[in-house]
Structures are given as C-alpha cells and as structure tokens.
Image (cartoon, grey):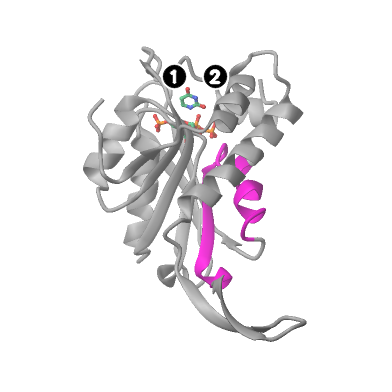
Amino acid sequence: MKTYPNVFIFDHPLIKHKVSILRDKNTGMKEFRELIEEITTVMTYESMRDVELVPVEVETPLEKTVQYRVKEESIAIVPILRAGLGMVNGVHNVFPTARVGHIGMYRDEETLEPREYYCKLPEGIEDKTVFLVDPMLATGGSACDALAALKKRGVKKIKFMAIIAAPEGIEKVAAEHPDVPVYVSTLDRCLNEHGYILPGLGDAGDRLFGTK
Ligand code: PRP
Ligand code: URA
C-alpha cells in the first residue's frame, strides 16, 4: 500500500499482543470490550504527541515553577455508533472530562453504503479537537461520511482513530480527507466480498454488545 503523510500505523508490540487476543473468535464479550478500551488508551497517548499545551504556574512543596498542561476542555470524543462506543472509555481514561457527541451510521448490507441515522454533538464542538473513533475501517465509507458530517457542522480539527483497517479504507480516507490525521493500530490484508476485513476480527459491534 502507498504511504500517506497523514496516516499513522502503530507498530507497538503491546498492541500486537492485545490485537491477537481481540481477533480470536474464542475471546468473549467482556474481554473483547476490555481490550478495545485498553488499545484505545494506548493509541490516545500516541496520537496526542502534537497536543497544544498551556503554561500553568504550579507550587511544589519546594518552589514555584511553570509547567505545561493540556486544555482538557478543548478535547471531544465522537464515536461512530455502534462499535465506536467501545472506544469512548479508552479516550476518557486519558481525558476524563472530554465531552461526547454521537454519530449513528450503519452499512447497508447489500450496497455497503453508509447511512447516517443520528447526530448529536456537544455545544462548541467547532472549537474543539475531536477524536472520531471507530474500531473498524473497512471500505472507509462510514469514516468518510462521519468526517464530512463533522466538517459540515464546523469542526476544524479532527483526529480519526481506528483499531483495525483495510488498505481500501485507508486509501479512501486519505484521498477524501487529506487534512485529517488517521491513527490505525493494525493494517490488515484486504476486504472479502462482503466488505469484512481479513483477517480482521469479525463484526466489532456484535462482539462488543453480544448481539450475535
Ligand atoms: C461497522 C464498523 C464501522 C463500519 C466500517 O459498523 O463499526 O462503522 O462497519 O465499515 P466501512 O468502512 O465499510 O464503512 P456497522 O455498519 O456494522 O454498524 P454497527 O457498528 O452498528 O455494527
Ligand atoms: N465492520 C466490522 O465490524 N467488521 C469488519 O470486518 C468490517 C466492517
């Protein structure tokens, strides 16, 4: 696959370890949910290397010093429903006060086209850095439409985070949204004829919520 300046694929041994358990069809719902959260927390740390810091004066037991903090109120999380919900706690572990918006998308199983069915965003989202999260980036249709929906509502700074991606999805997002940094824990081989990622982990929403 071509490389893109805005696409960051993690190559972290700890993430490899956790993703290998996530993929296993014998991993149950509780462990699956916990792993999605843990991987998201690690990814959040890694994707915030460019975060803006503000100086603050701190008094230690010994002296006053100028230190640097993240403006937590400038961070928001937007999961793509349903499976993105599984990543919210992972970002909240790093930014506990981040507001949460929701975008509902489902893929039409025949055409694989995404359909938006819900969108509720926190007030003032235009001025925040938004983590758009979804564990699976397959054809890229859902991510591209969610990114367009956020931009249409005035959001200027977005980071998209997915746990597993197919090359097809990365290419689509990189082509349609070259301004958006994309963080992916694992790049998989390809899509099958039903739009599932191979080797993948199956249907992330069903495994998170036990619907099948
Ligand atoms: C899954 C996944 C993504 C989308 C990825 O959601 O969570 O949102 O598919 O596929 P794409 O890149 O081809 O658009 P799904 O539509 O199955 O809905 P769900 O989360 O409600 O299960
Ligand atoms: N959505 C999923 O949940 N899994 C895939 O492999 C592709 C899309």
**In the visual, does 144 lie left or right of 163?**
left
Residue 44 picture location, percent across and down: 54, 49
Instruction: Give me the residue at 41% from left, 69% from top.
Output: 126
Tell me which corner region of the image, top left, top right, bottom left or bottom right, holds residue 10.
top left
Snapshot quadrant of residue 169: top left
Looking at mark 1, is its residue's CB closer than 8 Å to ligand 2? yes
Residue 160 is situated, as x and y percent measured from the top left of the image, at 42, 47
Residue 105 percent coordinates (x, y) = 46, 41
Label 1 sits on a secondary structure element that is loop
Q: Earlier in the sequence, mark 1 or mark 2?
A: 1
**Secondary structure beneath disc 2?**
loop
Placement of 114 over or under 127, stated as above or below: above
Q: How far apart are marks 1 and 2 (CA)?
A: 7 Å
Instruction: Name which residue lies at 26% across and 33% down.
Output: 171
**Relative height, residue 87 to residue 102 (above, below):** above
Q: Is residue 102 visible?
A: no
Q: Disc number at residue 196? A: 1
Image quarter in which the N terminus is found: top left
Bounds of the magenta span? 71-95
Q: Name the residue under label 2.
A: 202
Tell whether circle 2 marks a residue whose Cβ is less than 8 angstroms from ligand 2. yes
Q: Which amino acid does label 1 sit on?
A: Tyr
Vertical side of 108 occupied by 128: above or below:
below
Work out whether residue 207 or residue 1 is closer to the camera in this orientation and state it: 1
Q: Do the residues labelled 1 and 2 touch (CB within 8 Å)?
A: yes
| Circle 2 Cα neighbour tier, 10 Å, few/some/many (<14 / 14–19 / ≥20) | some
Q: Measuring 47% from the left and 45% from the top, which residue is drawn there?
A: 117
Location of residue 29 in the rendering, given as x and y in whole percent from the top left corner: 72, 26
Task: Tell me if residue 202 can be seen.
Answer: yes
Quadrant of the rendering where the C terminus is positioned: top right
Question: What amino acid is at disc 2?
Answer: Gly
